[in-house]
Amino acid sequence: MISSGDQIDAETGRALKLSLREGMAAEALATLTGGAFLIAFALDLGASNFIIGILAGIPAFMQLLQLPSVYLIERVRRRKLLYTAGALLGRSQWLLIALVPLFFTGRWGLILFLIGFTIRGVFLSVANLSMITILRDVVPENRIGEFFSRRTRYAAAVSVVLGLVAGYFVDWWGSAVPQHAVYAYSILFTLGFLCGLVSIWFMTRIPEPVMTPSGRPFLALIRTPFQDQDFRRLLAFLGSWSFAVNLAVPFFTVYMLKRIGLDLWFVIFLGVLSQLVSLVFMEKWGAIADKFSNKAVLRVCVPAFLLCLLAWTFTTMPDRYFLTVPLLVVIHIVLGFATAGTSFASGNIVLKLAPKGEATSYLAARTMVNSLAAGIAPVIGGTFADFFAVRKFALTISWHSPVRDLELQALSFSHWDFFFFLAFILGYVSLRFLVRVREVGEVDKSRVINEMMIAMRRDLKNFSSIGGLFSLFFLPLEAMRNTMRTPGEEGGAGQPDDKLP
């Protein structure tokens, strides 16, 4: 499928174009059925902190099923068929979940919601692994970083636009029909299911490369990633990092809605702001990873992410104060910058370390380790949420004089603040594991920082004019427009093109 040199033949170009469209449709499904909408729906059904932790852990635990999925893929060797079946059965659960508020309320509604959400995860574990391994074989080796950063960037563009529209719709519906406010989520979930069908349709049109026979027994295939010393070091970092992040991140929405008391529309806005920043930096991180290394990107973005975790503890002192909203805005901007690099580089480094033809077992190993950590962490958080709710740690600076007495609360930890601080400590520990990972072409992080600063100065110059600001505003729409072009539109139909679609 790949022509000689750096050029991409027409069939590969078409496959990459279809993959971009599939990613955008899948992101539409994820936006309408996940994030703040999913948490708010659960809270409306009466979910406790423990249930929120279970809800956050279910997708991760379901990914453990990728181990038998590897066996299934190796035996059947028809990945597109497995993807289609798993995606249809898994995404159809959103239709059932959408019907829950119409017929059930309270405890039974919550139970049925969790059951449907769990079944969805079971089938999607097979579908997702099948899809990723197909793309791993389709994308040219020297374009992995560029392509997947572009795919992620276009998906983020969809999430930004759709998230704002859906957030406005939920608020409008709650004001227009307050007695049936929860039905707004039923509408979103139904629309998400339809987007999921579109995603499946695009994926079925991508040619499936023939799987290279492994020539080894299944158990030997599974053991291979764990016998790779460099990959074991990478797994140690990914597992510890996943645990640290998921101890805190799943509760950001709960924290903003219940502790700070923000409106849902503003929570959605902060998420969109973070995605916009991530969208701007995604391509840059992809180019830097290809030029230097994924590890170098992680060594820049992981500390930035950790600072954001620590900053959450200062958003209340001990309650909402005049710096709460500005600090939340800054946190989400930096989170967008850091998430773009960490999510891209952590996934791409696995693909880079996986030998050609063995991506399935390496991806499954990564998923198993990440899933255990990401599944356990929020459950622990939800379990101890009520314990920490009645605990508090504070440091107060006092000034006493004959004229006046002054007290300033310099530090105040309560409830979720303990989790944010603990996640910061655990994330810092995970950096020790990252240092031990070896990647071909890795450089010192200072070179990456210099490269990013040059790119940022160039962008600031471009966006300093009115035209530049308009370009930034229309960036999500431009990304979607680009991927809607036909395969031959950029240089002649059926002609080799060395540019990614």
Image (tube, rainbow, N blue to C red):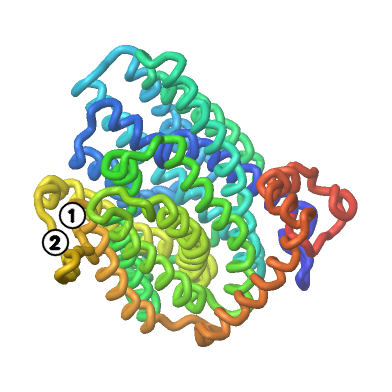
Q: Is residue 359 visible?
A: no
Q: Quadrant of residue 110?
A: top left
In the figure, 298 relative to 247: above or below?
Answer: below
In the figure, 188 relative to 484: above or below?
Answer: above
Q: Residue at x 21, y 21 (%)?
A: 106
Left or right, residue 135 beside residue 319: right
In the figure, 59 relative to 244: above or below?
Answer: above
> How far is disc 1 from disc 2 in space, using C-alphas?
7 Å
The reply to whether discs 1 and 2 touch (Cβ–Cβ < 8 Å) is yes
In the figure, 219 relative to 251: above or below?
Answer: below
Could you say where residue 486 lies in the image, as x and y percent from the top left? 80, 43
Q: What residue does disc 1 label?
A: 414
Could you say where residue 178 lies in the image, as x and y percent from the top left? 38, 16
Could you say where residue 137 lies in the image, as x and y percent from the top left? 59, 59
Could you say where residue 142 lies in the image, as x and y percent from the top left? 66, 71
Q: Residue at x 28, y 59 (%)?
A: 313
Query: Hey, what amino acid is under mark 2?
Result: Phe
